[in-house]
Image: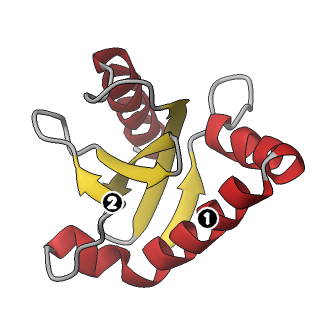
């Protein structure tokens, strides 16, 4: 699978920028991020198809195809595009049991924007 980071209209990549920050300030989170992204790159199609599961990766119910990657006390949201690409949309610190609706909505809006740009 190909991994991409959502880029907003100003050229910012929120998840990529977060990775650069944790690389400097939180080595353990950075290490797990790289491990999990490599895992998704290798196994993303099998996860999407339901053949393979991982305790830190889940599809969020009641969403437009948004998935969640758990990295320590952070969550990275992403979606699958055209069966061969994973697009990371946003990241946030996990402070409650349920994923905040505002974060899901942000991921869905970024998914729509990404798809519209690709057409």
Q: Name the residue nearer the viewer: 115 or 28.
A: 28
Query: Mark 1 falls on what kind of element?
Result: helix
C-alpha distance separating marks 1 and 2: 13 Å
Q: Left or right of 26: which side holds 64? A: left
* Above or below 25: residue 44: below
The percent coordinates of residue 74 (x first, y second) are: 52, 40
Q: Left or right of 31: which side holds 119? A: left
Whichever of labels 1 and 2 marks the residue nearer the N terminus, that label is 1
Graded by Cα atoms within 10 Å as few (under 14), some (14 to 19) or many (20 or more), the crowding at tag 2 reads: some
Query: Mark 2 falls on what kind of element?
Result: strand
* Above or below 33: residue 101: above
Residue 1 appears anywhere in the view: no
* Above or below 46: residue 100: above
The answer to which quarter of the image holds residue 1 is: bottom left
Q: Name the residue nearer the viewer: 16 or 33.
A: 33
- What residue sits 10% from the left and 33% below the top? 62
The percent coordinates of residue 83 (x first, y second) are: 30, 69
- What residue sits 41% from the left and 22% below the top? 106
The residue singled out by tag 2 in the image is 57
Residue 32 got which mark?
Answer: 1
Residue 91 appears anywhere in the view: yes
The percent coordinates of residue 77 (x first, y second) are: 42, 42
- What residue sits 56% from the left and 76% below the top? 38
Residue 114 got which mark?
Answer: none
């Amino acid at each position: 699978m190909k991994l991409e980071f959502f880029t907003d209209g100003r050229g910012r990549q929120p998840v990529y920028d977060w990775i650069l920050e944790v690389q400097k300030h939180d080595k353990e989170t950075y290490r797990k991020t790289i491990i999990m992204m490599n895992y998704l790159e290798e196994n993303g199609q099998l996860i999407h198809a339901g053949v393979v599961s991982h305790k830190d990766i889940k599809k969020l119910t009641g969403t437009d195809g948004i998935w969640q990657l758990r990295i320590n006390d952070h969550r990275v949201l992403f979606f699958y595009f055209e069966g061969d690409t994973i697009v990371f949309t946003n990241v946030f610190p996990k402070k409650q049991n349920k994923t905040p609706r505002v974060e899901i909505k942000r991921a869905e809006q970024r998914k729509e924007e990404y798809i519209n740009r690709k057409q």
